[in-house]
Structure formats: C-alpha cells, structure tokens
Amino acid sequence: MKTVVIKTAENMSDATYARVCRGFREMLGEDLNFKRVCDNGIVGGFIAEADGKVYDLSISSQLKEMKREIDG
C-alpha cells in the first residue's frame, strides 16, 4: 500500500481533507494510506507527495508565483 503525505494548514476542515483523500484515490486508482501533516506556513490549501510526485496546491506557492510574475 502506498502512502500519500498531505501537508495542510491546521485550519483545513476534516470534510475538506476527506475530499482531498477521495480525489487521490480516484486519481491514482489504488488503495492508499494517508498521512496528514499540519504546516501553517502553507497558509491554506495543501501540498501532497504521492508516488514520487509533488502536488502543490498551497496558497503560499500561489502567492510566490504571483510575486514572481509581478517582479518580472
């Protein structure tokens, strides 16, 4: 069984976390073990590591990308 590590801000609700887990099950199509790690540095959203890939849907990454675009 593969483990998916999902890093979330503490304010992510259990219902939202469950939806994220369901999405990974649908996407990867296999039995998965989930490990939740809280990191308020990501502000909101999540960063997941699954099967050697990183899925970064965090607010902090989106803000960094916007800053890069603004700074040129």
Image: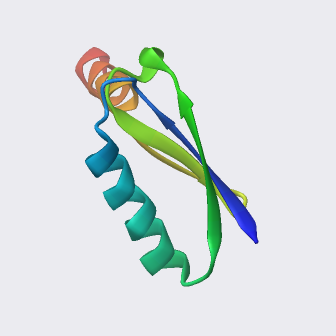
Count of picture labels: 0
Quadrant of res 68: top left
Q: Residue furthest right?
A: 1
Measuring 76% from the left and 72% from the top, which residue is drawn there?
1
Q: Residue at x 27, y 50 (%)?
A: 15
Residue nearer the viewer, 70 or 33? 33
Q: Position of residue 63 (x, y in %)?
A: 30, 23
The coloring applied to the image is rainbow
In the image shown, does 31 or 61 lie closer to the viewer? 31
- Residue name at image x 47 percent, y 67 percent: 24
Q: Which residue does the image show at 55% across and 77% down from the upper left?
A: 28
Quadrant in which the C terminus is drawn? top left
Question: From the viewer's perspective, is residue 9 above or below residue 19?
Answer: above
- The residue most toward the front is 14
Image spot of residue 10 (x, y percent): 39, 23
Residue 21 to residue 29: above or below: above
Determine the image quadrant of residue 20.
Answer: bottom left
Q: Where's residue 38, x and y in %?
A: 51, 26
Q: Is residue 31 above or below residue 64?
A: below
- Between 62 and 26, the residue placed more toward the observer is 26
- Compared with 49, 44 (above or below) is above
